[in-house]
Amino acid sequence: MNNNRSYFLISCMVFGFAFLYVPILSLIIFSFNKSKLVTVWAGFSTKWYGALLQNEQILQAAWISLRIAFVNACFAVALGTLAGFVLARLGRFRGRTLFTGMVTAPLVMPEVITGLSLLLLFVAMQDLIGWPQGRGITTITIAHITFSMAYVAVIVQSRLSSVDESVEEAALDLGARPAKVFFVITLPIIAPALVSGWLLAFTMSLDDLVIASFVSGPGSSTLPMVVFSKVRLGVSPEINALASIIVLLVSMGVIAAGYLMHRQQKIRQRDIQFAIAANK
Amino acid sequence: MAQSTRATPAQEPWNDPHAQPYIRIENVTKKFGAFVAVNNVSLNIYQNEFFCLLGGSGCGKSTLLRMLAGFDSPTSGKIYIDGTDMEGTAPYDRPVNMMFQSYALFPHMTVESNIAFGLKQDRISKTQTTQRVQDILELVQLSPFAQRRPHQLSGGQRQRVALARALVKQPKLLLLDEPLAALDKKLREETQFELVNIQEQTGVTFMVVTHDQEEAMTLSSRIGVMNAGEIVQTGTPTEIYEYPGSRFVADFIGSVNIFEGRITEDEADHVRIDSEEAGCSLYIDHGVTTTSGAKVWFAVRPEKIAISRDKSDADENCTSGTVQEIAYMGDLSIYHVELESGKRVRVTMPNLVRGVSDAITWDEQVYLSWRPSSGVVLMA
Ligand SMILES: Nc1ncnc2c1ncn2[C@@H]1O[C@H](COP(=O)(O)OP(=O)(O)OP(=O)(O)O)[C@@H](O)[C@H]1O
Ligand SMILES: [Mg+2]
């Protein structure tokens, strides 16, 4: 009985993992394929990686994407933190519900609508005040900030609501002004949330295809846009190579984060042991 | 036990109509929605006082302190500190430091920087800051832990950091929310002693919330007893203990026996009460202002009742019952005596000699008596 059940569980797990990872694995394997036909194995080769390094279009798109993602993440963290702080700390003020709704709306808004409305906004703004001139990297960045800021705000808010407010009150009580309390007490305490918010904003921006397609202009194709347009013309092994590199980078990031967290946990535990021992 | 700095009669500012209170709380009410956390509290606290707030959990003590520190504003009423109306004055502009019930230490700073934080805000020079932090660390016996973070400390150690952080700025008014609750007995007594020392040296006014009656009795110049958002009585420890104003206060501070009865004779210098519960007529040597026949309560403390096998010749203030339980506490013994009315009375007797062989034991018939000045009549 018990044995049956554990077989069942194991096969569920195997199936689940296969579902997630077989496509990625086949993608990596075929990136080393000699043949130009993606589905036919013709021997091992790394020539597509070489070709990728020669492909100006892809490299340029990747560079644009990274730049947008970086600027977006920084702005989203700054603005999202302020919004999250207001949501978590300012208690009940007039129009709080409206503000909450407006901050979190981009989370549930269909991307097509966000993209379209931003496009209309940019066009109208150009007519009225002459800025932004045409569509390009700037407009994509602004568009990305509007939705990734919402994610940061939610992360910061939930982190802040688990921080005892009296810690900030104690700082006020000891003579620090509110702005100083925010920078010296609140920000350092929620720093981990800011880091994860930044990373989330960064990846969301790298990931975005729909909104960027609406608000991009000539010469500002992001990596997802280039990949998507290439795939429509048939899957090329170059894309496989690119995807493999991305998978490699992501895995390294995850492993590094895991290692750091593990180490910190260990230090913390040692400290606690230390405290208990010294207290005896 | 720390020696109290209880004011001598000559320096009882609360009895001096010309004295200026340092804190004046006038009809302060605080509501959270429809819930009234602090209800119409008026209170004067004078310079150099050590004022203890006593009261059950949730009766509004912390809320009152938070309003003094400026984190909550009263729904109605006024708070004056040093003669200035505090309405609209931010916490960082008040001459007040508070120690939080939850300690509220800065988790990302070492013990040392936690304590130095307040001094830094005042732009005190570096050398002086270091010196003062070191001194206060010594005082709370945390010098070896100066470089630890709060999460590396035990509960009692954290409490001492919080206390040190509030003390180090030496403000005019210190609000301490249960400052010593997590400390062991020895450390608590030492810290009590230090608090009194600090007060003597610096003239700080203390307002302290505590659950520990003994602490309140030994430390405070006056005690305020709170119940359900109201201050039910303020007075010196002696006044609160010997002349409680209501059954709640009598019962809350120390233990007490309370008998219900009706007034039969009401004169300026004495009253007589007929109490079925006590099983005798009660004679008390202080007058009360009420009408004959009114329902009142008589309260007498366990240590003021004499227990004996022999009936005394008086027929007032004397009743009898059987011993139900005896608890030997070392310095004294506690007797639980059941009267004929079924009422249980608690009596304590000091153990004056060792191992008396014919001591009063279980199920014995005993007589209880007390003097006319031993108890008080309560109207509520
Ligand atoms: N922000 C708040 N919102 C709503 N109710 C509150 C708030 N703060 C306190 N209360 C309520 O007010 C009452 C008094 O709270 P307070 O913290 O002053 O109690 P306390 O006397 O300090 O109790 P304890 O001895 O347990 O610390 C409690 O019933 C509490 O639930
Ligand atoms: Mg409290």
Image: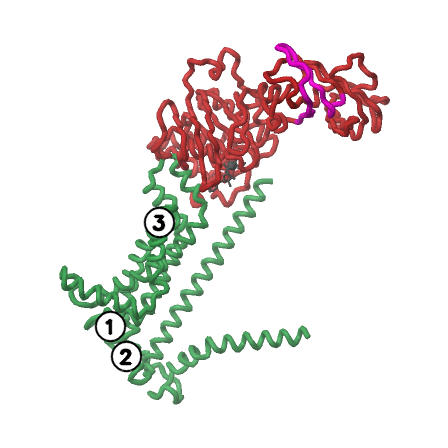
Chain colours: A green, B red
The chain under label 3 reads A
- Tell me residue A179's x, y (percent): 32, 42
- Vertical side of A234 occupied by B170: above or below: above
Q: Observer-nearest residue: B163 or B277?
A: B277
SS type, badge 2? helix
Earlier in the chain: of badge 2 and badge 1, it is 1
What crowding class fits label 2: few (fewer than 14 Cα within 10 Å), some (14-19), or many (20 or more)? few
Q: Quadrant of residue B377?
A: top right
Q: CA distance from mark 2 to mark 3?
A: 41 Å
Q: Is residue B277 magenta?
A: yes
The residue beneath circle 3 is A86
Q: Nearer the viewer, residue B290 or A55?
A: B290
Task: Point out residue A1 in the picture as x, y percentages from the top left corner.
Answer: 68, 75
Q: Is residue B274 magenta?
A: yes
- Name the residue tied to disc 2: A229
- The residue under the point 54% across, 47% down is A272
Is disc 1 on the same chain as disc 3? yes
Name which residue lies at 50% across and 51% down.
Answer: A268
Dots 2 and 1: beta carbons under 8 Å?
Answer: yes
Q: Position of residue B380 (x, y in %)?
A: 60, 25
Q: Are marks 2 and 3 in contact (CB under 8 Å)?
A: no
**Callout 1 amino acid:** Ser
Magenta segment: B255-279
Which amino acid does the dot numbered 2 rest on?
Answer: Ser
What separation in Å lies between label 2 and label 1 (alpha carbons)? 10 Å
Mark 3 touching mark 1, by CB under 8 A?
no
At which x and y percent is residue B40? 46, 30
The amino acid type of the residue labelled 3 equals Val
Q: Name above or below for residue B304 compared with residue A161.
A: above
Among numbered discs 2 and 3, the one appearing first in the sequence = 3
Q: Name the residue tied to disc 1.
A: A221
Disc sitting over residue A35 in the figure: none
